[in-house]
Image: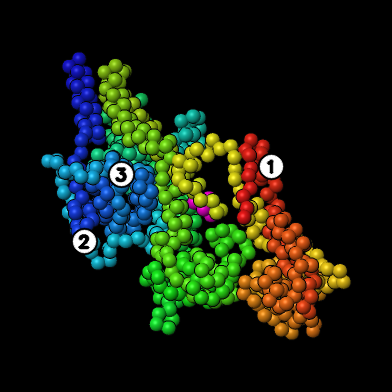
Amino acid sequence: MVIDLVVIGAGAALIALLAWYFFGPKRASQAQLVGQVQEVRVTVRGGYSPDLIRVRQSVPLRILFDRQESGECTSRVVFPDFALNRALPAYATTAVEFTPSKAGRFGFACGMNMVHGTLLVEPDGSAGGNGHTEHALSVPASAGEEPGAPSVDDDTAERKAEIGDLTRRVLVGAVLTAPVLFAAMVDGFAHPAWMPGILLNRWVQLALITPVFFYSGWPIHRTGWLSIAHRTAEMNALITVGTTTAYAYSLFVTVLPGALPADLRDLYFEAVGTIITLILLGRLLEARAKAGTGEAIRKLIVLQPRTARLVRDGSEADVPVEELVPGDMLSVRPGEKIPVDGEVVDGRSSVDKSMVTGEPIPVSKEKGDTVIGATINQTGAFRFRATRVGKDTMLAQIIRLVQQAQGSKAPIQRLADVVSSYFVPAVIFIAIATFVVWFVAGPTPAFTQAMISAVSVLIIACPCALGLATPLSIMVSTGKGAEQGILVRDAEALETAQKLDTIVLDKTGTITRRAPALTDVTSVPGVSEQDLLRLVASAEQSSEHPLGVAIVASARARGVQLLPAQSFDSVTGKGVRATIDGREVLAGNERLLEDAGAAVEPLQEAALRLSSDGKTPVLVAIDGRAAGVLGVADTIKEDSVAAITALHRLGLQVVMITG
């Protein structure tokens, strides 16, 4: 009876001690003011140290994350309330800078949502700090650790290395666990005579599972024990405590079987190996999924050219795009990408803006027009003045939008984070209570039965889906959406998508192919449609304009025999002029024909009809006289009708928007 009271008291005291350890007050580290910037260094090693940081509102903040480990778990840091999502290279210091614009308590976490920290933002004008505050030292990064954003190549290389390491650990775990799991399952149900006795040997099972526990499970155990040391129990801690207890108990049974009754000498080696291998397999799948979502951002980043042609004092020189500042004069030649956003000051050209707008037909640009970085210049050359560079360009804003969406948290995920933070300690408390109840009220031998019951609670309670499913689904959905040209504002938008009743679709590239095709050929009396198409297509053979390419492709598809051009001239922003079989052919817009003195009135009715149908009219004059109009349009995709019909069946109203 006395021993029962001692166990009850010890269990209650242990639960109280752990409750204080996990949920008790923690000291906050105060960010130091360095110049005009608050600065604090955070060590990343199985957790964040410090994980509670006190800063001032409206004062620029620089957090130096000194990551002293590798692996997928802490490879990113996410501040969802401030729309920040940054990669943290292994064994390097990375600076994350932003200005906390609102006061309150804000969480930050690793990309896998298993390591957490808290940012305490004090209202502007408060004294800040108290007697319980410890000051974080501001230590400059050493050589090779200069704070800054990691390169795309570094992030990709680390992710590949992590996938390779996880693959090896999963293979070792699967190969060594399979025979032990097979023997345990078959013998537990049927006790067949053909089962090899060596597979049921305790020492053989110990030899097979020990590498799985120590080698395959090392990333889990390391992070789990470190998280407990940081007073932030999470899923790794629960897995570590459960598998370690099961392995230790099985090891005890193997080495000293006589110390336990015969009916309590069961081994849990197969449970240890299976849990570790399955957890690692899940992380391998997560790492591969995240590698795919990161590819969407990498594809956007590589769109921007690395250099720009800077015009200064009458001479041109190639400079890195990072050195550009607003007001710089830049030169762009035919076929080149426009380096940054700006305004045309000299020259004329057509620009392919499909990267931004999705429109397949280039847009004419002349003095006073704006141009967007990463779009492609076509046939002309021009100079423009940079207006937005670096993080202010439209491409940078698109990339930032995707990153913010992947770093945001849906309301349900915030709830999952709260539940997870209490779930793991609660499981440990329940395991302790289970031990006490079985020891006091359970059958004999009381200690062994109580230990087995407590271990069972720890082993079966693994809330991986609770903490990983939601953030992983956000990463994958936003990444895949970006690959398809769909930008998601934030995670909350994803969650509320179930309430949608109307879908608004852009026409070009969504409903249509985003590739122009010839749809109409209209000729004036005295000119056959066949001759009109032959002459225009022959003239467009030397053109690189999408409209010309579409006309040539359609003519060849119709079996039209094209003729060589004796002369050819591309008139930027207007059309083409060519001599075909001794006849002068003009094909383009009204301005081209008017400049050549050709009458456009006979073609205006047909051109207006095509324009009202959403098609692009190409006016044609032969030997100075109006000859006809060709219609070019972006045709509908084969699956657009089926997709819109499917949306209607879901009860959604579908609306099309077009320019």
Residue at figure coordinates x 72%, y 67% from the top left = 618
In the shown orientation, is residue 364 left or right of residue 80?
A: right
In magenta, the rendered stretch is 479-483
User: Which secondary structure lies at badge 1?
Assistant: helix
Q: Amino acid at mark 1?
A: Thr
Tell how many labels: 3
What is the distance, in whole Å, between disc 2 and disc 1 at their CAs? 60 Å
Residue pointed to by mark 1? 645
Residue pointed to by mark 3? 102
In the shown orientation, is residue 339 left or right of residue 60?
A: right
User: Which secondary structure lies at badge 3?
Assistant: loop
Asked if disc 3 and disc 2 are in contact, CB closer than 8 Å, the reply is: no
Name the one closer to the observer, 435 or 38. Answer: 38
Using the image, tell me which numbered label, if any, was put on residue 43.
Answer: none
What is the distance, in whole Å, between disc 1 and disc 3 at their CAs? 46 Å
Query: Could you tell me if residue 294 is visible in this image?
Result: yes
Choose mark 1 or mark 3, whichever is in front: 3
Q: Position of residue 577 (x, y in %)?
A: 70, 78
Q: Amino acid at mark 3?
A: Lys
Choose mark 2 or mark 1, whichever is in front: 1
First in residue order: circle 3 vs circle 2: 3
Question: Residue 12, located in which quarter of the rendered image?
Answer: top left
Q: Residues within 10 Å of mark 3 (few under 14, many from 20)?
A: some
Name the one closer to the observer, 131 or 438. Answer: 131
235 part of magenta stretch: no
State which quarter of the image contains the N terminus. top left
